[in-house]
Image (tube, helix red, strand yellow):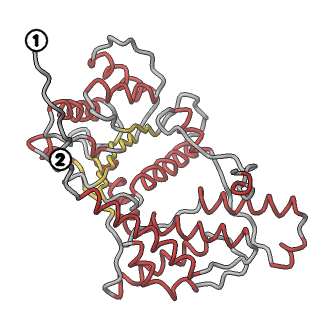
Amino acid sequence: MFGDLIDGFDLDTPTVGFDYATKEGWREFVEFTAPRPPPVTRREYDAMSSTDRAFYNIARERYMTVSARVVTPSLKRFVSAARNAMADNRSPDASKSGVLISGQPGHGKTTAVQEFGRAYEHARRARNPKPRRDLIPVAFAQVPTHATEKTMMKKLADFYALPYSRTATYETLLSRVSHTMRACSTELVIIDDIHRLDLRYRANEQAADALKELSERCPGTMVYAGVDVAANGLFWGARGEQIMARFELVTFDAYDAETLEAAEVWGRILTDLEASLCLIDQPEGEILTVAAELRDLSRGSIGRMAKAIRRCARQAIEDRTEHLNLDDLLVVLASRKDADEWATEKAAEPRRTRRRGPAMSRR
């Protein structure tokens, strides 16, 4: 039944899945490379054997999907804020500074913190004259659902593979994590999904306090990333005010083209994405002819647009046209936009009250 449907699947290319929440998985992510394949002409490509052509296609699909990254203004602001926070934290007299990234889904928040963490770890290891097996410059953890002070510390303990008993106290976990961070020279602590800390709830307040106490006991600079954190309660109350005072907020907003400067930024993003596709017959800058349509259909979301562009690039490789079909690209984005609008409308509909059955009589 499904045989014909999956004949076109690339079954030979391994899936890249990194467990960022463990030191082993994070190291695998840091050390993974998918270099850009050398450019070839159409004649050279057609002259390849079927095996060589398949490997070349795998290499460029892997590059554009995993390694190719676009430097955006939001990313530049984040890196600048992180550099300033880490510099401020070298002073023993100042309160610890951090960086907080907020924005809607699909705007590149998690990708930004992960890629910055990888680049920072590469730079730190390159400057270390003697390789250290225990050196862990960057730690990564996600805020668990219904987070408490203990579950938050357990997430960080799990990253370092620290053993602990089920009955371990918060103080024990905090002490072990902070000691390990110092021993491993951890300088950057990335906490993703920070929007799960709604400070209107007591347990979440404890988790926020735990992260604050950890930042004061370890040398690392804290970087938070989450979805629309203001609306999700992270800035609620006195603890929220402390976070706003300590953390520089960097918003990853949707891109627009309402001004000439904004249109130029959007154009640079599009041409960078186009260049990352490694398509042999793609005219340079052709994607700019539909720049306005791409902005409207993607709602300025780089993540949404990049996925659609790469999907069409894979199709161009598969059918050997080696050229983006811009009409198909617009159709793909329009379909995604319609699906998003439908889901939004359904989510906004009032929930129907479940009809109750007749009350059971008590005997």
- Quadrant of residue 281 within the rendered picture: bottom right
Three-letter code for the amino acid on which mark 1 is drawn: Arg
Q: Residues within 10 Å of mark 1 (few under 14, many from 20)?
A: few
Question: Residue visible at 56% across and 38% down?
Answer: 27
Labels 1 and 2: the sequence-earlier one: 2
Q: Relative to 102, does residue 220 appear above or below in the rendering?
A: above
Where residue 233 appears, as percent x and y from the top left, is 17, 47
Closer to us: 4 or 300: 4
**SS of the residue under disc 2:** loop
Question: Residue visible at 13% across and 27% down?
Answer: 359
Question: Residue visible at 63% across and 70% down?
Answer: 313
Question: Residue visible at 11% across and 20% down?
Answer: 361
Q: How many marks?
A: 2
- The CA span between labels 1 and 2 is 47 Å
Q: Relative to 346, does residue 208 appear above or below in the rendering?
A: above
Q: Which residue is mark 1?
A: 363
Q: Residues within 10 Å of mark 2 (few under 14, many from 20)?
A: some
Q: Which residue is mark 2?
A: 233
Is 130 placed left or right of 262 in the picture? Answer: right
Where residue 263 appears, as percent x and y from the top left, is 39, 84
Q: Relative to 3, does residue 162 appear above or below in the rendering?
A: above
Q: Relative to 165, does residue 246 appear above or below in the rendering?
A: below
**SS of the residue under disc 1:** loop
Closer to us: 251 or 290: 290
Where residue 268 appears, as percent x and y from the top left, is 48, 78
Closer to us: 68 or 84: 68
Three-letter code for the amino acid on which mark 2 is drawn: Gly
